[in-house]
Image (cartoon, helix red, strand yellow):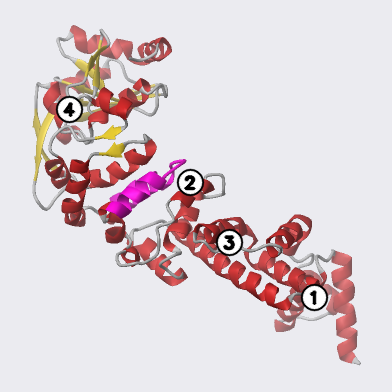
Amino acid sequence: MLSDDDRRELLERIEPLAAAFADAGYRFFLVGGLVRDALLGHGLTGDIDITTDAIPDRIAELAAGWADTVWDQGKRFGTIGARRGSTTVEITTHRAESYDSGSRKPHVRFSDDVATDLSRRDFTVNAMAIELPGWALLDPFDGLTDLAAGVLRTPSPPEGLFADDPLRMLRAARFSAQLSLIATSELVAAVRSSRPRLAIVSRERIEAELTKLLELPQPSAGVRFLYDTGLLGDLLPPWRHADAAVPAAALDDVADLSDPVAVRWAILLGPVCDEAAATRCLSALRCDNATRRKAAAILRAARALEAAAEAATALGDDAAWRMTARQLIADHEPELDAAAASLAAWGRAVHEPFASLLAEVRADEGASLRHLPIDGRRVMEVLGISGPAVGEALEWLRIQQIERGPLDADEACRLLTARNQGREH
């Protein structure tokens, strides 16, 4: 059960609310991820979800006596939201619902039976409740046993649950990674046969669920689940008939990189997509612009890094290697770590000693190579020029930095002056 500290914290936050429901003759159950995570010893995470046999209008009345703010946008689905201080709760009447074949929107029927409500939840590990007051655990589908055994199972036949809400198939992938759970063969078979139902889910909802998966510290198990069930090919068509191996394990190794979600998209798409095709895939999933741009930039940097390493090997000259390294840094510095991780994930890691030299140049010169020491205004002052000639002069300076290494402002001005004088003579 919950630790003593968790109990005390919960009581401090919601005991008056639970007491109000009990005094009015209604049952009051904590449900959802809070119960699951607390039983795992993860403490109290996220908002507080509650289910009760009170109808929505009565919920709103009772919550109003406790909360600073109450909202009823979800009332038609039986849900009332409330906030007191920093504590947010969602309180939902026990439900027994059905769905049309072409929609994820339920026809809500209210119930006075909490077990019926729990039976419509996605997985047994999420179908547990704790009743307040009293702290009695209600676990009609052995979710606690499944949690301890590392099993992902549904509280009712999975085909029906996935037909009602196909997004649950993607949540199965996420929970397999997040909680280190292994899906039962029955669940996996139901996902494979239910895949076409994802067509009724909006791209935005799918993208949000995939992002939650890729945000996990170790998403590889979830990506393998998507691949093994065929969902990955449905969501990312280039994987549908690909011969390449899915680089799932490598996704766990990039959690410390900047923007790991974009890095993971690049790693995942790189074996089967060029930059343009990857951008189309992410656009089709309604990924945000920043993620699409970052993933594309990583793929560009990976291709450039691989090409540069091959070119440097052919040259075999230290000065040429340094110029090649400087060009990479000038063009792709923000993405080079992600690019190297991507190439390693695809089995095409940059060989030594070029990798060592690149690391050395980045450490010694990287910060300066990304920018010129003077701007166009200073060029106009030094040379007395304007128009396209200014841009030409700046481009020439960039080349000088690649050939010579970083320049300071005085050196850049001297080089431009000497170049200009040489032209006049």
Residue 349's disc is 3
- Neighbour tally class for label 2: few under 14, some 14-19, many 20 plus, Cα within 10 Å: some
Q: Nearer the viewer, residue 288 or 406?
A: 406
Residues at marks 1 and 3, CA–CA distance in whole angstroms: 44 Å
Residue 118's disc is 4
Q: Which residues are magenta?
A: 204-228
Q: Nearer the viewer, residue 155 or 52?
A: 155
Q: Which residue was labeled with disc 1?
A: 380
Q: Amino acid at mark 4?
A: Leu
Q: Main secondary structure of the magenta part?
A: helix
- Neighbour tally class for label 4: few under 14, some 14-19, many 20 plus, Cα within 10 Å: many
First in residue order: circle 4 vs circle 3: 4
Residues at marks 1 and 4, CA–CA distance in whole angstroms: 73 Å
Query: Would residue 48 be counted in the magenta stretch?
Result: no
In front of the other: label 1 or label 2?
Answer: 2
Q: Compared to 310, does 296 lie above or below?
A: above
First in residue order: circle 1 vs circle 4: 4
Residues at marks 1 and 2, CA–CA distance in whole angstroms: 50 Å
Q: Which residue: 15% across, 27% down? A: 117
Q: Is residue 396 left or right of residue 222?
A: right
Q: Position of residue 348 (x, y in %)?
A: 54, 64
